[in-house]
Image: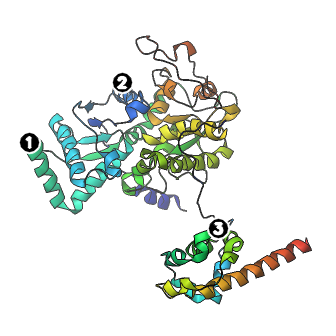
Amino acid sequence: MKLEGKKTLWKEYQKEIASDNYFYARSCIRQNFFPASETTFLRVLREELGKTIHEDARHTTCTGIVYHSDLVTIETTMTVIARQFSLMTQSGYLNYVASCITSFGLYTEILDMWEHFPEMEQKAREMLWKATKREFEKPKSLAHASDIIYKFRNEIAAKSKYKLINLNTGQPLKVVEHIGCHYSKMFPHKGIGGAEYPYVLVGMIEAFGGEVVDYPERRHCCGFGFRQYIVKANRGFSIASSRKKFESMTPYKPDFILTNCPGCPYFLDRWQYAISEMEGITYGENGHGIPVLTYEELTGIVLGYNPWDLGLQTHQVAVEPLLDKIGIPYDLSQKYLGSDGEFIGKPEKPSVLKVY
Amino acid sequence: MAKDFGYTISCDRQIDFDKLSRSMYLEVKKAEPSVDACISCGTCAATCTAGQFTDFSLRKFILLLRRGDSLSVIQSIDKCMLCGKCQLVCPMGVNTRGLIYSIQVISRRIECRNRRVVNKM
């Protein structure tokens, strides 16, 4: 292919991302699953990149979990989302940034629906006014938080203290990237690289010095699908999806998995424990699992933040082997101490999966 | 001992055509073209006498053949007693009795073919 042609074609897979003045909406579940990720995102943007990012404590769920579980109507969902937009409008911002992939997908879906059915937007405005006496403007730009890190990946790489290089071999670390389904599978033109060539995490990995692993089940869902895990009897489908991915990626010996969704890192991390307990199988080196990171944790790691400030002690799969490979120092005696030095509790040791 | 979390890991139901082949379905379709009209409604399976006592289900077998899983069909097709009740109820007019007979004949042909290959080895 001619280089000019390739560049023209690739332009179709790009999206506009605002460069400053963001309104940030946190995720319902990420603060429980990976508690330091969102804080790290804000820290990187404010302290490393000098950007303005505002959040409002009054914002709520986007209703994504109940919407995808068929428990609320579209009218409820769009009114809640309209309220989120009204908080953004009230704060004087127009660049909306969602921490959660499902929220990002849902905001995109609602904005797309309003574009095609303006009467639904009018209905949302009326319902919001009746319920709260609030009004809103639609965001000028809507981005997922990983889009923002992607946009500034080279600036972050320039400030980084560590590269994704294996200290022992001198070779780039092999990284599996896993994109949340709601990022670009529903609205491909809203994600960097579309549904076929999602580049948002690949761009970060390459900028930070790693090497991306391509494997057969790369685009397979992690199994987080809401109906699969909310009903206990369906969890067999969820864990089967994760296992399918692990079996497909293991021959390529990845050093870690990078994700940009609330559910994917949680399930890819915790299911490794469940599979090891149910079948006695582990997928990493020497009885360990394959560490799973959020993109904020990875950013914090390369910037040299303390691993325990990044919340890496809350992972089921031990991240210490990865830290050793990169050459990041850590103090095991501090692992289970909170920011105030108080002991936060230590999980039980799994019977099969090796941990530190 | 494996831990019990209250659920098990579901089996993979991916249809992998590197491992499976639709050739038997195509052979069956040649012998009994009406199979193409099947909409997998399951009326045949609901009325089947053999199905009351065994896991025999014509609906399932047609689906398996279409997916290329011939082996499962070959192993169970002889449970049919060719009573023809399924033919009376099929809303699509599939010649089900003729279909099952064709599958039985083709299954035996495939078994003979496989045996000859094994003997040659």
Residue displayed at 28% across by 43% down: A62
The crowding category of the residue bearing disc 3, from other C-alpha atoms within 10 Å (few below 14, some 14 to 19, many at least 20), is: few
Which comes before the other along the chain, label 2 or label 1?
2
Please give left or right for residue B97 compared with residue A93 in the image.
Answer: right
Q: Quadrant of residue B111?
A: bottom right
The correct choice, above or below, for A328 with respect to A284 in the image is: above
Q: Quick one: SS at disc 3?
A: loop
Residue A208 in percent (x, y) is at 52, 35
Query: Which of the labelled discs sits on residue A133, or is there none?
Result: 1
* Discs 2 and 1 carry the same chain letter: yes
Residue A296 in percent (x, y) is at 44, 33
Query: Which of the labelled discs sits on residue A47, or is there none?
Result: 2
Query: Which of the labelled discs sits on residue A7, or is there none?
Result: none
Nearest the eye: A317 or A299: A317
Residue displayed at 44% across by 47% down: A180
* Discs 1 and 3 carry the same chain letter: no
Q: Which residue is mark 3?
A: B17
* Residue type at the position of mark 3: Phe
Residue A262 in percent (x, y) is at 42, 39
Which residue lies most toward the top here?
A341
* Residue type at the position of mark 2: Glu
Q: CA distance from mark 2 to mark 1?
A: 36 Å
Disc 1: which chain? A
The crowding category of the residue bearing disc 2, from other C-alpha atoms within 10 Å (few below 14, some 14 to 19, many at least 20), is: few
The correct choice, above or below, for B73 with respect to A312 in the image is: below
